[in-house]
Amino acid sequence: MQLRLTHLLLVFWFTNINFGLAQQSHRATFNFNQNWKLKIVDIDHAEKADFNDSGWKHINLPYAWNQDEAFKFDITHLSTGIAWYRKTFTLPESSDSKKVFIEFEGVRQLGAVYINGKFVGRHENGVMAFGLDLTQFLNPYPQENVIAVKTDNNWNYKEKLTGSSFQWNNNNFNANYGGIPKNVKLHITQNVYQTLPLFTSLGTEGTYVYASDFDVSKKEATINISTQVKNESNNPVDAQLKVKIKDLQGKQVAAFDGDITQIAPAGMNFLRGQQNLDNLNFWSWGYGYLYTVVTEIWVDENLVDAVSTRTGFRKAEFKDGMVYLNDRVLMMKGYAQRTSNEWPSLGMSVPAWISDYSNKLMVESNANLVRWMHVTPWKQDVESCDRVGLIQAMPAGDSESDVTGRRWDQRLELMRDAIIYNRNNPSILFYESGNESISEAHMAEMLQIKNKYDPNGGRAIGSREMLDSELAEYGGEMLYINKSADIPFWATEYSRDEGLRKYWDEFTPPYHKEGSGGTTHTNVNGTKVKDASAYNHNQDAHAIEDVTRWFDYWEMRPGTGERVSSGGVNIIFSDSNTHYRGQENYRRSGEVDPMRIPKDGFFAHQVIWDGWVETETPQAHIIGHWNYLPKDQVTKDITVVSTAKEVELFLNGESLGKGEQSKRFLFTFKNISFEPGILKAVGYNEAGQVICESQLETAGEPTALKLTKIERPSGAVANGADYIIVQVEVVDKNGKRCPTALNTVDFKVEGEAVFIGGIAQGPNNYIGSKTLPVEGGVNRVFIKTTEKSGETTISATSKGLLKDVLTFNTRKVDLSDLSEDFPTDKLPVNLDFGETPRTSSIKISRELLKIAAIHSTSNENDVWKAVDDNELTQWENASMESSAIQFELKEKTVINQAVLKLNGWRRKKYPVRITVDDTLVYKGITPLSLGYVTLDLKPVQGKTIQLELMGESESSDEMELVEITGKIDQAGLEDSNASTAKFPIIEVEFYKQNTQ
C-alpha cells in the first residue's frame, strides 16, 4: 500500500511538472515593474553589468523620476535631465532556447536600452510604446542579467540620426514626467510565435481582431482574426491558427479553426480566421463589456504559442453629420483631457485602478467621449476606457500647426505605431491627425495609414478643422460650433474658462471676487494675458459658463435638421499641470480638481449631458451651497441647472416662485435672501407634473473630521506602488459636510504605508505636505503602500475638531523580478448604463425647407455658397445697397425659424431684416454665439424669403477669446474691430416646426 501511494504521488508530481512545462512551453508574459534602481544623474559606465548601483534609489515602476514635482511647479519648470534606471533579474529555467522580448509602454523622452553592458536599442519619441528583442544579449538561467535604461527628458531633445526635435515635446501641452513613467512587460516565446504590435522597434504588427456583418437587433456579428506569425526556427513550419473566445465571466462561447500556412525560416505571415457569433453583448457607452480572444498557433499538432487579446465588439458609423454606435445616434459629449491625466505628486504614474477611477468619473458626469491632448495616451488609459465604457479620440502627436519634412514623418510614424498598438481597443472611435488642420495631402497620408492597418475597426480619422476636406472622416473647430450633413463635426475644445474649487462665490470665505486675480502666465510669444477674468472664476460662474457654452451645441443637435452638430468636448476634465492662464500655476478648467473632487460644473454636466441625444432622465442641480453666515445677510441670485420645463424654488417649504429660463437649462431666481434650512428646487414638465427635485440643506457648526478611503476594488496591494486615496471632510455633529470649512488638517501615517500628500491653494500648492487645508469642507491625500503586507493607520487632526482614524490592511502579492501579478488583474468593468437601447435617440423637432433658387443683385455667382454645407465658403454683398438676398423655396409653406452662421459670429452683431413674401417676420440684431444663431420668425406661409442688412454691423468683445499665442481670435474676420456694411453669410437654413 505504501509503495502504491508513493507511486501515485510520483505520477501526480511528474504530471504536474509536465503540465507546468506545457503551460510554459508556448508563451509567458511577466510584469517587469518590480525591483528597479534609479539614479538622477548622467553617470559614466552605468550601463555596465558590474556597475555598483547599491546606493541607488529602490523603486517600482511606473515611476517618473520627477513625479513628486507634479503641480508643485508649473509645466515649464518641471525638472529635466538624464536619469538612469537599472534592474537585475534572472530568466526562468524554462526559457533556454526561447525568444525574449521587452515591452515598454513608454519612456520620456529618450530611452536607450542596454543588456549586460551591450547596447540593444534606442527609442526617442517619448510617447509611444516600443519593444526590443533581448534574446542574443541575455545570460541563460541561472545567471543574472542587468538591464540599464538611460533616459533624457530635455524639452529640446533632438533625434540622434536627424537632429530633428519632436513637435509634441511641448512645454505648454505635454507635461514632462521623465524616465519610465509607464509599465514594462517581459515576453518569453517559442521560436515560432505571434508577433508583438510594436512596429517601429520590432517591425511587427501583432494580432488584429475586429467584428463585421453586424446585425445589432439579433446581437450577431462575424468575428475576424488576423495574427502575424514569425518563424525563427531553422526549418519551415506549417502553422495553424485556432481561436477561442471567452465572455466576460471567462466562459468559452466560441472555438474555431483558421488558416494553415507554411512559413519559411526567418519568414513572417498572417494567419486568419472568422466565425459568426450570436448572443453577443456589444460594447457601448457606459457598458464596457469585453471578451477575451485567445489566438493559438499549432505546429505538428503541438501548441507553440497563445496570445490573449481583451477586446469588445461594437458597430460604429459616421454619416449624415452624425455618429452612430450600435445603430443608435450618439451626440458626442465629453472632455478634452491632457494625455498625462496627471495627479499631484504622482504625475501620470498611477496604478491601473486609479486610471479607472478617474475615467469612470467622466462617464458618471454623463460624458461619452474623451479627446486626449495632444499625444497618444498610454496603454493603461486606453484599456481603462474600454473597461469603463468611455469613447476615445486618439491623437498621434502634435502641438499646434501642420509641419513638413522630418517632423511630419515623425507624426506619420507615430500614428502608424499607435494604430497598430491600440486597434483592438473598442473604446477608440476617432483617430486625430492634428490639433489643427493639416493639408489635404497630409490627410491623404494619414487616411492611407488608417486604411492599411485598421481598415475594418469602425473608426474615423480626421483632424481639428478640416471643414472642407474631401478625405477627412470627421472634423470640427476648437472654439466654435460646426454643422454638417455629411461627416460628423464635433468641437474639439469649446470652453476654456478656469476656476479654483476653493472659491464658491463672492459671499463665501475666502470671499474671492468673481474674475479677480490676474495671471502669472505669459503667452508663447512672450506677451502677458491682458484680461484673466475668465480664468479666475468662482465655481458658480464657471458652472454657468459651462452650461451656456453647451447650449449652442445642444440647440443644433441631431434631430434639428439635415445639417447638425455632433456635439463637442469641454476642455478639460481634471485640473492639469499644463498650460494655464489664471492666477495659479496650473490649469483649473477641470470639472473636478486635481484629486478628482467634483466642482459644481461636474454636477451641471450630469444634468445637461444626460441621454444619448435628447435628455432622457429629468434632473436638477442647485449651483452652490446653502451655508452662509447670518451676520453677512447674504442676498444673491440662485441658479438651478435642470432639464425640466419649469423650475420652482422653495425655502423651508415656502415658494419663492419660478425661475427665469435661459439657454434652455438655466433657471435664475433673483435676490434670494439666505435663511438657514432647506433650499429646494422642483422641476415640472409641460403638464405641470413634478419630474425632478434637488435640495441644499444648511449644515451645523464644524464639529469633527471624517475620513473615508478610496482604494483598488479588490483591496490595496503591498507592492510598493499601490496608492490609497484618503478623503477628509469637516462635518457637523450629524456627520454632514460643512461646505464653507477651510480648516487646516494634520495627517499621520503609521504601519505599512507612507504619506504622499494632496493639493490645496498655498505655498507650493502644499505638495508633499502632511499639513494642508480642506477647501469647501473636503480634501484628499494619497498614501502609498510598502512591499510588506499588513495594517496601516492614518489619523487626521485639526484644532477645535474631533480627530478621525482610519485603519486598513494591504494584501501580499508577487514581488519577484518576473512577477505574474499585473496592475490590471481583477479590475471590474463598468456596466452601469446597460446595453445600447434599441429605441431612437432622436426627436425630430423641425423640418428643413428645401431651396429651389437663390437671387441677389450682388455676387450672384456666389449665392449658393450660403447653403453649400461648407463653412469655409460664404456669400457677401458688395455694398449696403445690395445687401438683400432672396431664397425661393420649392413649395409654399409656413416658415418658423431662420438659422444663420454669419462671419465674425463671436465678434459681430448684425442688424437684420427678414421678410416672407414681403411680410416682415423678423427685425433685430443678431446675437453673438459660438457659430450659429436661431432666429424665431413670425409664422407666415410663403415661398420667397428675403434677408437683408439694415445698417453697419457693430463689433463687440463680450465673447473675446485669446489664443495661446496671445492673439485675439477673430471668429473668421480679418478685421473685427471696424464696423462694416458687409453681410457675410456662411450658411443659412429655414425651418418649419415638426407637427407630428
Image: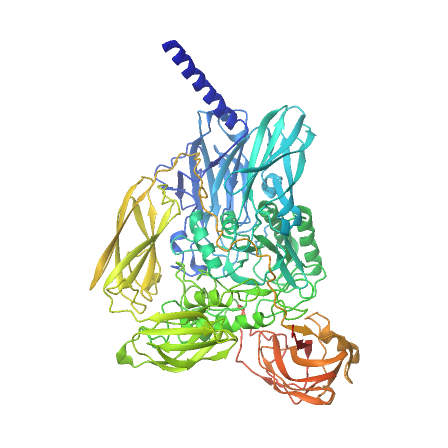
> In the displayed structure, would residue 583 be above or below residue 463?
below
**Residue drawn 48% across and 48% down?**
829
The picture quadrant where one finds residue 655 is bottom left
In the rendered image, residue 71, in percent from the top left (x then y), is placed at 40, 59
**Relative side of 754 to 128, left or right:** left
Name the image colouring.
Answer: rainbow
In the rendered image, residue 514, in percent from the top left (x then y), is placed at 40, 76
**Residue drawn 30% across and 78% down?**
675
> In the displayed structure, would residue 846 be above or below residue 83?
below
In the rendered image, residue 652, in percent from the top left (x then y), is placed at 32, 76
In the rendered image, residue 413, in percent from the top left (x then y), is placed at 62, 49
Q: Nearer the viewer, residue 184 or 50?
A: 184
Q: Quadrant of the N terminus?
A: top left
Could one spot residue 833 in this view of the protein? yes
**Residue drawn 41% across and 48% down?**
65
The picture quadrant where one finds residue 592 is bottom left
